[in-house]
Amino acid sequence: MFKNILVPFDGSEQAVKALEIAVGFAKGERARLKVLNVAEMVPVPGAPTATIFLIDQGISRMQELELKKAQYVIRRHGAKADVIAERGHPADSILRFAKRNKTDLIIMGHRGKSGLQRFLLGSVSDAVAHHAHCAVLIVR
């Protein structure tokens, strides 16, 4: 039924749970599994170039650690997956990636933000669930 499964992965506990579930789905369905980590660029108006460089290095290092964590979970379950890093707005990047890669199912964690936080900041999982062209499973 599912041929291409995408797991957006931010290193959180919910993302690990989603990845573990996705590994099970992928094995059962003999589907391709792709894990996507999206690092959001934070605008720093008027910041000196050195500051922007240091922020960029920190974001790259954090993304590298999150990808290693995803690879560890995948190996621990004896699975294979493509692990991809991108930069951009998380929800937009996930939706574009899913469409471009003909994703059948997105399995992702839910951070459980409070009502006010969700109203003010939005929720990546909510945006993906509402705008995805395919099925979305949100793991709590």
Image (cartoon, rainbow, N blue to C red):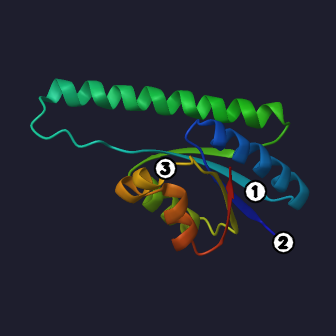
For the residues marked 1 and 2, what is the alpha-carbon distance in whole angstroms?
12 Å
- Check residue 101 in the rendering and tell me which mark sits there, or answer none: none
Residue highlighted by disc 1: 32
Amino acid type for the residue under numbered disc 1: Arg
Residue highlighted by disc 2: 1
Taking the view exactly as shown, the residue that stands out farthest to the right is 28
Identity of the residue drawn at 74% across and 34% down: 73
Looking at the rendered image, the quarter that the N terminus falls into is bottom right
Q: Earlier in the sequence, mark 2 or mark 3?
A: 2
Coordinates of residue 71 in the picture (x, y in percent): 68, 34
Secondary structure at numbered mark 3: loop
Residue highlighted by disc 3: 114
| Residue 72 versus residue 94 in the image, above or below | above
Residue 77 picture quarter: top right
Mark 2 or mark 3, which is nearer to you? 3
| Residue 26 versus residue 73 in the image, above or below | below
Identity of the residue drawn at 79% across and 49% down: 21
Coordinates of residue 134 in the picture (x, y in percent): 64, 73
Tell me: 30 left or right of 137: right
Identity of the residue drawn at 42% across and 57% down: 122
